[in-house]
Amino acid sequence: MLLSDTRRYDITTKVMDPSGSAPCRIGSNEFVQGSLNDYQTVLDFGTDCDVLTIEIENVNTDALHELQNQGVKVFPKPETLELIKNKVLQKNFYQKKNIPTAPFFSFTKKAQMEQELAKSKLSFPFVWKAATGGYDGKGVSIVKTENDLSALPDCEGLIEELIPFEKELAVVCARSEKGEITSYPMVEMDFHPTANLVEYVFSPSLLDQNIQTKAKKIAEDICQQLNHVGLLAVEMFYTATGDVLINEIAPRVHNSGHLSIEGNNCSQFDMHLRAILNLPLGNTDIVLPSVMINLTGEEGFEGPVRYEGVEKIMALSGVHIHLYGKAETRPFRKMGHITITAPSLEEARAKAKIVKETIKVKSQ
Ligand code: ADP
Protein backbone atom coordinates (compact mmCIF):
# COMPACT_ATOMS: atom_id res chain seq x y z
CA MET A 1 0.00 0.00 0.00
CA LEU A 2 2.94 2.27 0.73
CA LEU A 3 4.49 1.28 -2.57
CA SER A 4 1.34 2.19 -4.55
CA ASP A 5 1.73 5.75 -3.32
CA THR A 6 5.44 5.87 -4.22
CA ARG A 7 4.37 5.31 -7.85
CA ARG A 8 2.23 8.46 -7.80
CA TYR A 9 5.21 10.51 -6.64
CA ASP A 10 7.72 8.87 -8.99
CA ILE A 11 9.89 7.62 -6.11
CA THR A 12 12.33 4.83 -6.90
CA THR A 13 12.03 2.06 -4.34
CA LYS A 14 13.94 -0.95 -3.16
CA VAL A 15 12.35 -3.35 -0.66
CA MET A 16 13.70 -6.17 1.45
CA ASP A 17 11.63 -9.00 2.86
CA PRO A 18 12.66 -12.42 4.21
CA SER A 19 10.19 -14.18 1.90
CA GLY A 20 10.94 -14.50 -1.80
CA SER A 21 7.22 -14.48 -2.53
CA ALA A 22 6.44 -11.34 -0.47
CA PRO A 23 3.72 -9.18 -2.10
CA CYS A 24 6.09 -6.17 -2.15
CA ARG A 25 8.30 -7.90 -4.74
CA ILE A 26 6.00 -6.76 -7.54
CA GLY A 27 5.39 -3.24 -6.26
CA SER A 28 8.99 -2.05 -5.97
CA ASN A 29 11.68 -1.12 -8.49
CA GLU A 30 14.05 -3.60 -6.88
CA PHE A 31 13.34 -6.47 -4.53
CA VAL A 32 15.90 -8.06 -2.22
CA GLN A 33 15.22 -11.25 -0.31
CA GLY A 34 17.04 -11.13 2.99
CA SER A 35 16.88 -11.34 6.75
CA LEU A 36 15.78 -8.13 8.45
CA ASN A 37 17.66 -9.21 11.55
CA ASP A 38 21.05 -9.80 9.98
CA TYR A 39 23.46 -6.88 10.49
CA GLN A 40 25.41 -7.23 7.23
CA THR A 41 22.30 -7.89 5.12
CA VAL A 42 20.54 -4.76 6.40
CA LEU A 43 23.71 -2.69 6.05
CA ASP A 44 24.34 -3.85 2.47
CA PHE A 45 20.71 -3.21 1.60
CA GLY A 46 20.65 0.34 2.91
CA THR A 47 23.99 1.81 1.81
CA ASP A 48 22.76 3.13 -1.55
CA CYS A 49 19.41 4.43 -0.20
CA ASP A 50 18.63 8.10 0.48
CA VAL A 51 15.79 7.41 2.91
CA LEU A 52 15.04 4.16 4.70
CA THR A 53 11.79 3.24 6.43
CA ILE A 54 10.29 0.08 7.93
CA GLU A 55 6.90 -1.60 8.18
CA ILE A 56 7.84 -3.97 10.97
CA GLU A 57 9.79 -3.09 14.11
CA ASN A 58 11.80 -6.29 14.20
CA VAL A 59 14.83 -5.04 12.23
CA ASN A 60 18.54 -5.06 13.11
CA THR A 61 18.93 -1.62 14.68
CA ASP A 62 22.77 -1.81 14.90
CA ALA A 63 22.81 -1.79 11.11
CA LEU A 64 20.31 1.09 11.06
CA HIS A 65 22.55 3.11 13.42
CA GLU A 66 25.51 2.49 11.11
CA LEU A 67 23.50 3.53 8.05
CA GLN A 68 22.46 6.68 9.86
CA ASN A 69 26.15 7.38 10.60
CA GLN A 70 26.86 6.95 6.90
CA GLY A 71 24.31 9.67 6.10
CA VAL A 72 21.23 7.60 5.19
CA LYS A 73 18.06 9.15 6.60
CA VAL A 74 16.49 6.43 8.73
CA PHE A 75 12.88 7.04 9.80
CA PRO A 76 11.76 5.99 12.37
CA LYS A 77 15.07 6.57 14.12
CA PRO A 78 16.84 3.38 15.31
CA GLU A 79 16.67 4.68 18.92
CA THR A 80 12.88 4.89 18.65
CA LEU A 81 12.70 1.38 17.25
CA GLU A 82 14.81 0.09 20.14
CA LEU A 83 12.46 1.73 22.62
CA ILE A 84 9.35 0.35 20.95
CA LYS A 85 10.68 -3.16 20.31
CA ASN A 86 10.90 -3.67 24.06
CA LYS A 87 7.61 -3.27 25.96
CA VAL A 88 9.44 -2.76 29.26
CA LEU A 89 11.46 0.16 27.88
CA GLN A 90 8.29 1.52 26.29
CA LYS A 91 6.36 1.44 29.58
CA ASN A 92 9.30 2.98 31.48
CA PHE A 93 9.30 5.80 28.92
CA TYR A 94 5.60 6.57 29.57
CA GLN A 95 6.18 6.51 33.30
CA LYS A 96 9.18 8.83 33.04
CA LYS A 97 7.31 11.27 30.80
CA ASN A 98 4.15 11.21 32.96
CA ILE A 99 2.03 9.80 30.15
CA PRO A 100 -0.96 7.98 31.69
CA THR A 101 -0.65 4.19 31.33
CA ALA A 102 -1.81 1.06 33.22
CA PRO A 103 0.12 0.38 36.49
CA PHE A 104 2.79 -2.30 35.95
CA PHE A 105 6.01 -3.87 37.13
CA SER A 106 8.73 -5.43 35.01
CA PHE A 107 11.02 -8.42 35.48
CA THR A 108 13.88 -10.15 33.69
CA LYS A 109 13.00 -13.73 34.62
CA LYS A 110 9.89 -15.68 35.62
CA ALA A 111 11.25 -16.37 39.11
CA GLN A 112 11.63 -12.62 39.65
CA MET A 113 8.08 -12.10 38.37
CA GLU A 114 6.74 -14.55 40.97
CA GLN A 115 8.65 -12.83 43.78
CA GLU A 116 7.46 -9.39 42.71
CA LEU A 117 3.90 -10.61 42.35
CA ALA A 118 3.81 -11.71 45.99
CA LYS A 119 4.89 -8.19 47.03
CA SER A 120 2.92 -6.18 44.49
CA LYS A 121 -0.50 -4.59 44.76
CA LEU A 122 -1.55 -6.21 41.45
CA SER A 123 -4.04 -9.03 41.84
CA PHE A 124 -5.68 -11.59 39.52
CA PRO A 125 -6.73 -11.13 36.80
CA PHE A 126 -3.86 -9.21 35.24
CA VAL A 127 -2.10 -8.96 31.90
CA TRP A 128 1.30 -10.56 31.22
CA LYS A 129 3.39 -9.24 28.32
CA ALA A 130 6.68 -10.47 26.90
CA ALA A 131 9.24 -7.66 26.62
CA THR A 132 10.18 -8.56 23.06
CA GLY A 133 8.99 -10.66 20.17
CA GLY A 134 5.27 -9.96 20.63
CA TYR A 135 3.20 -8.90 17.64
CA ASP A 136 -0.56 -8.81 17.13
CA GLY A 137 -1.25 -9.99 20.65
CA LYS A 138 1.12 -12.98 20.46
CA GLY A 139 3.24 -12.01 23.44
CA VAL A 140 0.21 -11.11 25.59
CA SER A 141 -1.76 -13.27 28.06
CA ILE A 142 -4.55 -12.53 30.45
CA VAL A 143 -3.69 -14.34 33.66
CA LYS A 144 -6.91 -15.12 35.49
CA THR A 145 -5.78 -17.37 38.32
CA GLU A 146 -2.65 -18.82 39.94
CA ASN A 147 -3.08 -21.90 37.69
CA ASP A 148 -2.42 -19.82 34.54
CA LEU A 149 1.05 -18.88 35.77
CA SER A 150 2.61 -22.24 34.87
CA ALA A 151 1.85 -21.74 31.17
CA LEU A 152 3.82 -18.46 30.99
CA PRO A 153 7.25 -18.67 29.37
CA ASP A 154 10.41 -17.82 31.30
CA CYS A 155 11.47 -14.52 29.75
CA GLU A 156 11.81 -10.79 30.32
CA GLY A 157 8.46 -9.06 30.52
CA LEU A 158 5.98 -7.04 32.46
CA ILE A 159 2.76 -7.48 34.33
CA GLU A 160 0.13 -4.80 34.23
CA GLU A 161 -3.29 -4.14 35.62
CA LEU A 162 -6.14 -5.50 33.50
CA ILE A 163 -7.97 -2.37 32.41
CA PRO A 164 -11.73 -2.88 32.19
CA PHE A 165 -11.84 -0.49 29.26
CA GLU A 166 -14.98 0.80 27.60
CA LYS A 167 -13.26 1.25 24.26
CA GLU A 168 -9.92 0.79 22.54
CA LEU A 169 -8.91 3.91 20.67
CA ALA A 170 -6.22 4.93 18.23
CA VAL A 171 -4.88 8.22 17.00
CA VAL A 172 -2.54 8.11 14.03
CA CYS A 173 -0.32 11.15 13.88
CA ALA A 174 2.51 12.22 11.62
CA ARG A 175 5.49 14.50 12.00
CA SER A 176 7.92 15.66 9.32
CA GLU A 177 11.61 16.38 9.75
CA LYS A 178 10.95 20.10 9.84
CA GLY A 179 8.57 19.55 12.77
CA GLU A 180 5.18 19.90 11.09
CA ILE A 181 2.72 17.70 12.94
CA THR A 182 -0.81 16.51 12.26
CA SER A 183 -3.17 13.76 13.36
CA TYR A 184 -6.15 11.85 12.00
CA PRO A 185 -9.49 12.01 13.77
CA MET A 186 -9.58 9.35 16.51
CA VAL A 187 -10.85 5.87 15.63
CA GLU A 188 -12.36 3.10 17.77
CA MET A 189 -11.19 -0.50 17.53
CA ASP A 190 -12.78 -3.86 18.28
CA PHE A 191 -10.51 -6.80 18.92
CA HIS A 192 -11.10 -10.48 18.26
CA PRO A 193 -11.62 -11.98 21.74
CA THR A 194 -9.26 -14.94 21.40
CA ALA A 195 -6.80 -13.94 18.66
CA ASN A 196 -6.13 -10.52 20.28
CA LEU A 197 -6.17 -9.04 16.76
CA VAL A 198 -7.99 -5.93 15.56
CA GLU A 199 -11.20 -7.13 13.96
CA TYR A 200 -12.95 -3.82 13.21
CA VAL A 201 -11.90 -0.16 13.13
CA PHE A 202 -14.57 2.58 13.17
CA SER A 203 -14.10 6.16 11.96
CA PRO A 204 -14.97 8.60 13.31
CA SER A 205 -15.16 7.73 16.99
CA LEU A 206 -18.48 8.71 18.52
CA LEU A 207 -16.97 9.57 21.90
CA ASP A 208 -17.18 13.09 23.31
CA GLN A 209 -15.04 15.77 21.71
CA ASN A 210 -13.16 16.37 24.97
CA ILE A 211 -12.03 12.72 25.07
CA GLN A 212 -10.90 13.00 21.47
CA THR A 213 -8.95 16.14 22.29
CA LYS A 214 -7.31 14.37 25.25
CA ALA A 215 -6.30 11.40 23.07
CA LYS A 216 -4.99 13.64 20.29
CA LYS A 217 -2.89 15.57 22.79
CA ILE A 218 -1.39 12.38 24.23
CA ALA A 219 -0.54 11.13 20.72
CA GLU A 220 1.00 14.38 19.50
CA ASP A 221 2.94 14.85 22.76
CA ILE A 222 4.56 11.43 22.36
CA CYS A 223 5.38 12.23 18.74
CA GLN A 224 7.14 15.43 19.86
CA GLN A 225 8.87 13.81 22.85
CA LEU A 226 10.35 11.18 20.56
CA ASN A 227 11.30 13.80 17.99
CA HIS A 228 9.65 11.32 15.69
CA VAL A 229 9.66 11.54 11.90
CA GLY A 230 7.01 9.60 9.98
CA LEU A 231 3.74 8.11 11.06
CA LEU A 232 3.08 7.16 14.68
CA ALA A 233 0.04 5.11 15.68
CA VAL A 234 -0.93 5.51 19.31
CA GLU A 235 -3.21 2.85 20.82
CA MET A 236 -5.13 3.83 23.94
CA PHE A 237 -7.80 2.58 26.36
CA TYR A 238 -10.80 4.66 27.32
CA THR A 239 -11.92 3.67 30.79
CA ALA A 240 -15.31 3.80 32.51
CA THR A 241 -13.92 6.55 34.76
CA GLY A 242 -13.26 8.77 31.75
CA ASP A 243 -9.50 8.28 31.64
CA VAL A 244 -7.47 7.81 28.50
CA LEU A 245 -4.50 5.48 29.07
CA ILE A 246 -1.82 4.67 26.55
CA ASN A 247 -1.42 1.00 25.66
CA GLU A 248 1.29 1.01 23.03
CA ILE A 249 2.66 2.83 20.02
CA ALA A 250 3.78 1.80 16.56
CA PRO A 251 6.20 4.02 14.60
CA ARG A 252 4.87 3.14 11.16
CA VAL A 253 1.79 2.76 9.00
CA HIS A 254 -0.69 0.85 11.09
CA ASN A 255 -3.78 -1.31 10.93
CA SER A 256 -5.84 1.38 12.66
CA GLY A 257 -5.06 3.75 9.76
CA HIS A 258 -5.91 1.49 6.80
CA LEU A 259 -9.37 3.01 6.46
CA SER A 260 -7.80 6.38 5.69
CA ILE A 261 -7.24 5.18 2.08
CA GLU A 262 -10.92 5.70 1.31
CA GLY A 263 -12.16 7.40 4.48
CA ASN A 264 -9.85 10.43 4.71
CA ASN A 265 -8.46 12.99 2.29
CA CYS A 266 -4.86 11.87 2.60
CA SER A 267 -4.21 8.18 3.28
CA GLN A 268 -1.79 7.15 6.04
CA PHE A 269 0.54 5.75 3.36
CA ASP A 270 0.64 9.03 1.44
CA MET A 271 1.11 10.81 4.79
CA HIS A 272 4.03 8.61 5.87
CA LEU A 273 5.83 9.31 2.57
CA ARG A 274 5.25 13.05 2.96
CA ALA A 275 6.58 12.95 6.53
CA ILE A 276 9.75 10.95 5.86
CA LEU A 277 10.53 12.96 2.72
CA ASN A 278 10.03 16.26 4.59
CA LEU A 279 7.21 17.34 2.26
CA PRO A 280 4.08 19.26 3.31
CA LEU A 281 1.80 16.96 5.32
CA GLY A 282 -1.63 16.04 3.92
CA ASN A 283 -5.21 16.76 4.92
CA THR A 284 -6.53 14.28 7.52
CA ASP A 285 -10.20 15.32 7.29
CA ILE A 286 -12.79 12.59 6.97
CA VAL A 287 -14.32 12.19 3.50
CA LEU A 288 -16.90 9.62 4.61
CA PRO A 289 -17.50 7.60 7.79
CA SER A 290 -15.81 4.22 7.42
CA VAL A 291 -15.42 0.79 8.96
CA MET A 292 -12.42 -1.45 8.35
CA ILE A 293 -12.52 -5.22 8.65
CA ASN A 294 -9.34 -7.25 8.82
CA LEU A 295 -9.51 -10.17 6.46
CA THR A 296 -7.88 -13.03 8.35
CA GLY A 297 -7.51 -16.74 7.64
CA GLU A 298 -10.44 -18.84 8.85
CA GLU A 299 -9.74 -21.31 11.62
CA GLY A 300 -9.30 -24.84 10.30
CA PHE A 301 -7.80 -23.81 6.94
CA GLU A 302 -4.13 -23.79 6.03
CA GLY A 303 -2.37 -23.76 2.63
CA PRO A 304 -2.81 -22.05 -0.76
CA VAL A 305 -5.43 -19.35 -0.27
CA ARG A 306 -8.95 -19.28 -1.70
CA TYR A 307 -11.32 -16.34 -1.12
CA GLU A 308 -15.03 -17.02 -0.83
CA GLY A 309 -17.73 -14.39 -1.41
CA VAL A 310 -15.57 -11.74 -3.10
CA GLU A 311 -17.97 -11.15 -6.00
CA LYS A 312 -20.97 -10.85 -3.68
CA ILE A 313 -19.37 -8.07 -1.67
CA MET A 314 -17.99 -6.36 -4.77
CA ALA A 315 -21.60 -5.85 -5.84
CA LEU A 316 -22.21 -3.64 -2.78
CA SER A 317 -21.50 0.07 -3.08
CA GLY A 318 -18.89 1.58 -0.77
CA VAL A 319 -17.08 -1.73 -0.27
CA HIS A 320 -13.36 -1.48 -0.98
CA ILE A 321 -11.39 -4.72 -1.06
CA HIS A 322 -7.65 -4.94 -0.44
CA LEU A 323 -6.14 -8.41 -0.87
CA TYR A 324 -2.45 -8.40 0.01
CA GLY A 325 -1.39 -11.14 -2.38
CA LYS A 326 -0.08 -13.57 0.22
CA ALA A 327 0.01 -17.06 -1.32
CA GLU A 328 -0.70 -19.09 1.81
CA THR A 329 -3.35 -18.75 4.47
CA ARG A 330 -3.35 -19.99 8.06
CA PRO A 331 -5.72 -19.34 10.97
CA PHE A 332 -5.85 -15.62 11.82
CA ARG A 333 -3.13 -14.65 9.32
CA LYS A 334 -3.82 -11.14 8.02
CA MET A 335 -4.53 -11.64 4.31
CA GLY A 336 -6.09 -8.30 3.49
CA HIS A 337 -8.63 -5.80 4.66
CA ILE A 338 -11.92 -4.34 3.52
CA THR A 339 -13.07 -0.78 4.09
CA ILE A 340 -16.74 0.11 3.95
CA THR A 341 -17.65 3.75 3.47
CA ALA A 342 -21.18 5.16 3.81
CA PRO A 343 -22.90 8.50 4.43
CA SER A 344 -23.26 7.55 8.12
CA LEU A 345 -21.27 5.33 10.47
CA GLU A 346 -24.44 3.43 11.27
CA GLU A 347 -24.89 2.46 7.61
CA ALA A 348 -21.22 1.55 7.28
CA ARG A 349 -21.52 -0.68 10.37
CA ALA A 350 -24.61 -2.44 9.03
CA LYS A 351 -22.91 -3.12 5.70
CA ALA A 352 -19.72 -4.25 7.46
CA LYS A 353 -21.75 -6.91 9.26
CA ILE A 354 -22.98 -8.30 5.91
CA VAL A 355 -19.46 -8.18 4.46
CA LYS A 356 -18.00 -9.98 7.46
CA GLU A 357 -20.59 -12.75 7.18
CA THR A 358 -20.08 -13.13 3.42
CA ILE A 359 -16.34 -13.10 2.77
CA LYS A 360 -14.21 -16.00 4.02
CA VAL A 361 -10.51 -16.78 3.66
CA LYS A 362 -10.08 -20.52 3.16
CA SER A 363 -7.57 -22.85 1.59
CA GLN A 364 -7.84 -24.79 -1.68
P1 ADP B 1 0.48 -6.36 20.70
O1 ADP B 1 1.73 -5.57 20.83
O2 ADP B 1 0.74 -7.78 20.46
O3 ADP B 1 -0.52 -5.73 19.77
P2 ADP B 1 -0.94 -5.27 23.02
O4 ADP B 1 -0.09 -4.86 24.17
O5 ADP B 1 -1.48 -4.17 22.17
O6 ADP B 1 -0.19 -6.38 22.15
O7 ADP B 1 -2.16 -6.11 23.54
C1 ADP B 1 -3.08 -6.72 22.65
C2 ADP B 1 -4.50 -6.53 23.16
O8 ADP B 1 -4.62 -7.11 24.47
C3 ADP B 1 -4.91 -5.08 23.36
O9 ADP B 1 -5.31 -4.48 22.18
C4 ADP B 1 -6.05 -5.25 24.37
O10 ADP B 1 -7.23 -5.72 23.76
C5 ADP B 1 -5.52 -6.33 25.28
N1 ADP B 1 -4.78 -5.71 26.41
C6 ADP B 1 -3.47 -5.37 26.44
N2 ADP B 1 -3.14 -4.79 27.62
C7 ADP B 1 -4.25 -4.75 28.36
C8 ADP B 1 -4.57 -4.27 29.67
N3 ADP B 1 -3.66 -3.75 30.49
N4 ADP B 1 -5.86 -4.37 30.08
C9 ADP B 1 -6.81 -4.93 29.30
N5 ADP B 1 -6.58 -5.41 28.06
C10 ADP B 1 -5.32 -5.33 27.58
Image: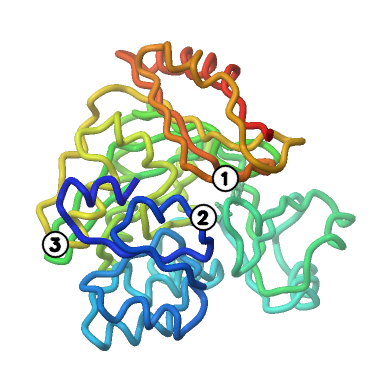
x and y, in percent, of residue 120 in the image: 71, 67
Amino acid type, label 3: Asn
x and y, in percent, of residue 125 in the image: 75, 49
Q: Is residue 196 left or right of residue 340?
A: right
- The image's colour scheme reads rainbow
Q: Is residue 329 left or right of residue 81?
A: right
Q: CA distance from mark 1 to mark 2?
A: 8 Å
Marks 1, 3: nearer the viewer:
1
Farthest residue, direction right = 147
**Label 1 belongs to which residue?**
327
Q: Upstream in the sequence, badge 3 or badge 2?
A: 2
Q: Secondary structure under badge 1?
A: loop
Q: Residue at x 27, y 54 (%)?
A: 220
**Label 2 belongs to which residue?**
21
Amino acid type, label 1: Ala
Q: Residue at x 64, y 37 (%)?
A: 297
Q: Residues within 10 Å of mark 2 (few under 14, many from 20)?
A: few
x and y, in percent, of residue 329 in the image: 63, 42
Q: CA distance from mark 3 to mark 2?
A: 32 Å
**Label 3 belongs to which residue?**
278
Q: Is residue 167 above or below residue 250?
A: above
x and y, in percent, of residue 23 in the image: 45, 50
Q: Nearer the viewer, residue 301 or 204?
A: 301
Q: Secondary structure under badge 2?
A: loop
Q: Upstream in the sequence, badge 1 or badge 2?
A: 2
Amino acid type, label 2: Ser
| Dot 2 beta carbon under 8 Å from ligand 1 | no
Q: Nearer the viewer, residue 257 or 358?
A: 358
Q: Are marks 1 and 2 in contact (CB under 8 Å)?
A: yes
Q: Residue at x 15, y 53 (%)?
A: 10
